Image (tube, grey):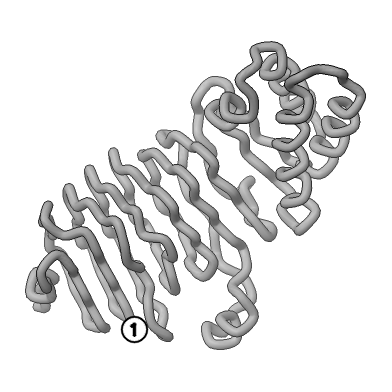
């Protein structure tokens, strides 16, 4: 059986292809991971690794993770790359700076903090042709135990097929475009110092919905970041509560 620790080079873990099954990898000294070119990881446990660079799906061939677990990890990779995650768990971890344009997540559980993360429904055209799919599967995922800050779903990710965080103060909008259009109209009529901040927040979300993202989720941390003014936050919360009623 192939072992991941044999592919360590200094502070880097570099894997090109291969099959890795039922093993644990824990090395606090590494800061970069590259899994590439069709590697297959089955029931691998990553424990207490702190990654600042790399990709979980580098190369031209998609890599696969099945039943893998990431525990107490800091995953700061930028491009997730070409990868499919099935029945994976992210426990007590920090996921930061992910740009997921060509990855798929199916029946995964996230009990972690996600910050500055993008999940896109569609690979770029050239990548879609190479992968043989026009849409990334994103379904059956459970984020109930997660904390979101600046997490964006784009291109039509069907959030109704997933479970969003359960923190008080979060909002799930089934018709984001209608909700944000109404909210933008309301805020434009307000003469207050905080109105521009709230308007900027709403317009970014509205443009995302107009590009195909029908449903949206706003975390309580997103509301706090939108404006530092208590009155502005109160109005924004009110608008989002009204938006949740639209279908």
Query: Residue at left 39%, top 63%?
Result: 85
- Does residue 215 appear anywhere in the picture? yes
Q: Position of residue 126 (x, y in %)?
A: 60, 84
Local SS, label 1: loop
Residue 86 vs residue 83, the one in the foreground: 83
Count numbered badges in the picture: 1
Q: Quadrant of the C terminus?
A: top right
**Residue that carries the numbered disc 1 in the rendered image:** 37
Look at the image and tell me whether residue 247 can be seen. no
- Name the residue: 73% across, 40% down: 174
**Would you call the spot at circle 1 few (<14 residues within 10 Å), some (14-19), or many (20 or more)?**
many
> Dividing the image into 4 quarters, which one contains the N terminus?
bottom left
Q: Name the spot of residue 232 as percent of width and height, x first.
A: 71, 18
- Quarter of the image for residue 87 reads bottom left
- Above or below: residue 177 compared with residue 42: above
Of 85 and 232, which appears nearest the observer? 232
The answer to whether residue 201 is left or right of residue 75 is right
Answer with left or right where residue 93 lies relative to residue 196: left
Q: Residue 137 appears at what percent x and percent y?
A: 55, 65
Q: 29 and 89: which one is in front? A: 29
Q: Residue at the front extreme?
A: 193
In the image, residue 240 sits, relative to residue 98, either above or below, namely above
Against 151, is 230 above or below? above
Tell me where residue 34 sits by quadrant.
bottom left
């Amino acid at each position: 059986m192939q072992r991941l620790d044999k592919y360590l080079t200094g502070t880097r873990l570099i894997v090109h292809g291969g099959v890795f099954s039922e093993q644990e990898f824990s090395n606090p000294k590494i800061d970069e991971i590259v899994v590439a070119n069709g590697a297959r990881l089955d029931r691998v446990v990553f424990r207490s690794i702190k990654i600042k660079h790399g990709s979980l799906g580098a190369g031209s061939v998609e890599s696969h993770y099945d039943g893998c677990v990431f525990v107490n990890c800091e995953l700061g990779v930028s491009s997730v790359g070409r990868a499919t995650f099935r029945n994976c768990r992210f426990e007590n971890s920090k996921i930061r700076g992910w740009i997921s344009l060509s990855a798929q997540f199916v029946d995964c559980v996230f009990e972690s903090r996600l910050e500055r993360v993008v999940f896109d429904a569609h690979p770029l055209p050239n990548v879609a042709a190479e992968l043989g799919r026009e849409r990334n599967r994103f379904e059956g995922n459970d984020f109930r135990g997660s904390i979101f800050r600046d997490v964006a779903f784009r291109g039509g990710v069907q959030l109704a097929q997933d479970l969003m965080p359960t923190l008080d103060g979060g909002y799930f909008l089934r018709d984001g475009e209608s909700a944000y259009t109404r909210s933008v109209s309301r805020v434009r009529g307000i003469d207050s110092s905080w109105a521009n901040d709230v308007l900027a927040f709403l317009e970014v979300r509205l443009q995302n919905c107009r590009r195909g993202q029908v449903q949206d989720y706003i975390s309580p941390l997103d509301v706090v970041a939108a404006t530092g003014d208590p009155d502005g936050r109160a109005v924004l919360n009110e608008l989002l509560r009204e938006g949740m009623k639209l279908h």
